[in-house]
Amino acid sequence: MILTATSAHAELSAEDLAKIAQNPVGNLISVPFQENAYFNVGPLDGTQNVLNIQPVIPISLNDDWNIITRTILPIISLPAFAPGQGSTNGIGDVQVSAFLSPAKPGAWIWGVGAITQLPTHSNDLLGNNNAGLGPTFVFLHLEHGDPWVYGVLVNNVWSVGPSNNPFGNAPKYNNGLVQPFVNFNFESGAYITSSPIITVNWEARGSQQWTVPMGGGVGKLFKIGRLPVNTQIGAYYNVVRPDFANNWQIRAQVQFMFPK
């Protein structure tokens, strides 16, 4: 039996629901709110906060294929980078991913598609005026009776706008992301998780390219009435990072799930 998002959710255990929540291309509507606190950012060692609102909406093409859309809307609080400068608050650039994924997968699940970045920022310090486009894919293992859920999400976004001013707010960019994830689930709906977000700025030089965090956290699936809610919190330390990037990060998430 492979876990799917159907009306059978009412019969699934808390562990099974938690595992479904850990599938980036699961066939159910969900709305995660992910708070990220980045510590010791910039020359003044400030704290940056990013609240990502990340709705996931599946679209059924036919009995065999789904399109899974994942949107990330960041709400950012950027600390001062110079004495006397205030913080900058607002909306960052939205990213939208669309994965083509089998509607009836086996224990190994995959999705492949495209990611776009849109210049929706409310302040020039919070984004880039160039749009972006690139490929994305996800590959994971999820099976009934197996407490482990593990896999990897990968994308790369290239700027496609006409501007190429390195001193303005629209320089070209070429950014990659690799997010391996592993979860061990308990029957109660609790789980242990690690999902570091490794990023690379291909336009930077040498040691300024990579950010590589290590860490993990815990999570718990519970219900408000019949509504499944997935919660988790974790901490990550950047073992590799550019100058003035954060060294520690705390990530907390509440995910509302809407089974069909």
Image (cartoon, rainbow, N blue to C red):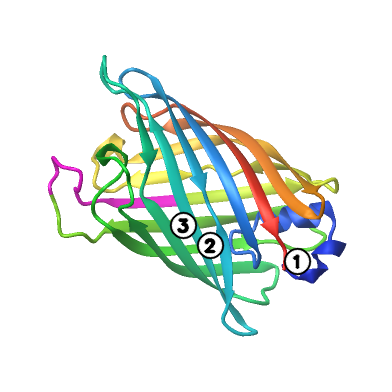
Q: Secondary structure at mark 3?
A: strand
Q: Residue at x 38, y 19 (%)?
A: 45
Quick one: SS at disc 2?
strand
Classify mark 1: helix, strand or loop.
Answer: loop
Cβ–Cβ under 8 Å for marks 2 and 3: yes
Could you say where residue 21 lies in the image, as x and y percent from the top left?
68, 55
Q: Nearer the viewer, mark 3 or mark 1?
A: 1
Amino acid on which the number 3 mark rests in the picture: Val
The Cα–Cα distance between marks 1 and 2, rounded to whole angstroms, is: 17 Å
Give the amino acid at mark 1.
Leu
Q: Position of residue 74 (x, y in %)?
A: 44, 45
Q: CA distance from mark 3 to mark 1?
A: 23 Å
Secondary structure character of the magenta stretch overall: loop
Which three-letter amino acid code belongs to the residue tagged 2?
Val
Left or right of 217: which side holds 198?
Answer: left
Write the start and end of the magenta stretch as one range: 165-177
Identify the residue under disc 1: 3
| Residue that label 2 marks | 138
- Residue 151 quadrant: bottom right
Does the magenta run of residues contain 231?
no
Relative side of 252 to 43, left or right? right
Question: Which residue is more in the foreground, 115 or 109?
Answer: 115
Foreground residue, 72 or 174?
Answer: 72
Can you say which quadrant of the picture contains the N terminus? Answer: bottom right
Query: What residue do we see at 41% from left, 28% from top?
Result: 246
Question: If you read the primary sequence from the N terminus, does the residue marked by circle 2 or circle 3 appear first?
Answer: 2
